[in-house]
Amino acid sequence: MNRYAQAQALNVTEKRQSRSVSRQRIRLDLPLLISSLSLLALGLVMVGSASTSIAEDHSGEAFYYMWRQLSYLAVAFVSAFLIFMIPLKFWQRSGPTLMLINVVMLLLVFIPGLGREVNGSMRWIHLGPINLQLSELVKLFVIFYLAGYLVRHAEAVQTSAGGFLRPLMLLVVLAMLLLLQPDFGAVAVMLMTAMIMMWLGGARLFQFLLLMLFFVAALTLLVFISPYRMERLTGFMNPWADPFDSGFQLTQALIAFGRGEWFGVGLGASVQKLFYLPEAHTDFLFAVIAEELGLFGVLLVISLFIVIILRSLKIARDAENQNNFFNAYIAYGIGVWIGLQAFINIGVNMGVLPTKGLTLPLMSYGGSSLLVMCIAIAILFRVEYETQKKIYGAAPAKKQRRDQMNKNMNKLQVPV
């Protein structure tokens, strides 16, 4: 074989290797994708099943809420795709601005005519045909801000109390605004996510523990000075003492779990959703899943959430190994956030935790939660994409092929 034929053969081999690397660089995390899509699909079906009675009563159309959820899902997919196209450097630069936007958003709900009260809480702003719950965006923006702060002030966070406390003082402002709505559940999730991120960022353990004690004491004080929170706590500890008032939600949820047994009563055959279980298609969707799909459905949903959390931590760890610390903190934060919110919602449904107004991520009815959660998953995919891009090289494919071709030709040159 002459030198030209050898060069051509090497060029063909190099092109195949380049195409293989290109395919590797755009590969999505299949377990994360399958788990997310499975929860979205199952959530859509269960929202349709859980809301038939209330939908028919309110609108005359049994699947009214399911069709609305499907339209929210379409918007969420488009938004997630657009967010995926944005480099994470943009969010890193925008961190302080996002915190300012958080404060403004939380103040908007108190403007007469713009904020809307639902079940005694001012958590939504009215935008034409939709109501937007801004606290969902607040939790995501806090993760962006903290990830950037931990990168910019890594040494201060690890060595001084001031570096550890400064960002948390800003979170206290957000927490106070959320408590005025009131939205106790969002405060708990936001603060716990923030503290875990600070710990992962290198905060000293004793500072972390002292702050945990402070927040536990503060939340306990809020419970004792608020009659309705105290009522929820006492009702949670013994719901059967007042099953028709303070313990009504929990007792109905427990009845749903008991009826489900191993494989459930069948899709659409729930009795508790027939005006017995309040918020059956939102906060207590998991109880309807337990009744209609049984222990099998419960374990399936929990397993899918575990996969999402583990893949989030894996994506974060890969980014950290490549020294993409901002990307890593974002992935850690999103994984912790989804895990905490799912744990709290499932715990409330099972009677393990006091009642909180938190949705089941990717599943419960609601456009705001569905939109923000899909965006969060898209950001996880973006973190993975940028990590793979760094691992496999960011040089353009044409330049790589040209450089490799020159090396191949140099190897084939025969000294004179």
Image (spheres, helix red, strand yellow):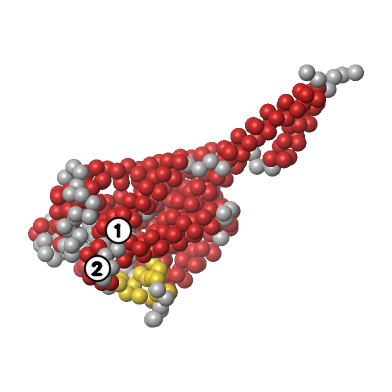
Would residue 403 appear left or right of 136 to someone viewing this image?
Answer: right
Q: Residue at x 42, y 76 (%)?
A: 128
Which residue is at the front of the view, 15 or 109? 15
Which residue is at the front of the view, 254 or 169? 254
Does residue 4 sit above or below 261 in this rendering?
Answer: above
Query: What's under tag 1, amino acid-wise?
Result: Val
Q: Residue at x 60, y 42 (%)?
A: 389
Name the image quarter holding the N terminus: top right
- Helix, strand or loop status at disc 2: helix
Res. 192 in view: no
Q: Position of residue 57 (x, y in %)?
A: 23, 70
Q: Residue at x 33, y 51 (%)?
A: 42
- Which residue is disc 2 drawn over? 56
Query: What's under tag 2, amino acid-wise?
Result: Glu
Give the farthest residue toward the bottom: 112
Q: Which mark is residue 47?
A: 1
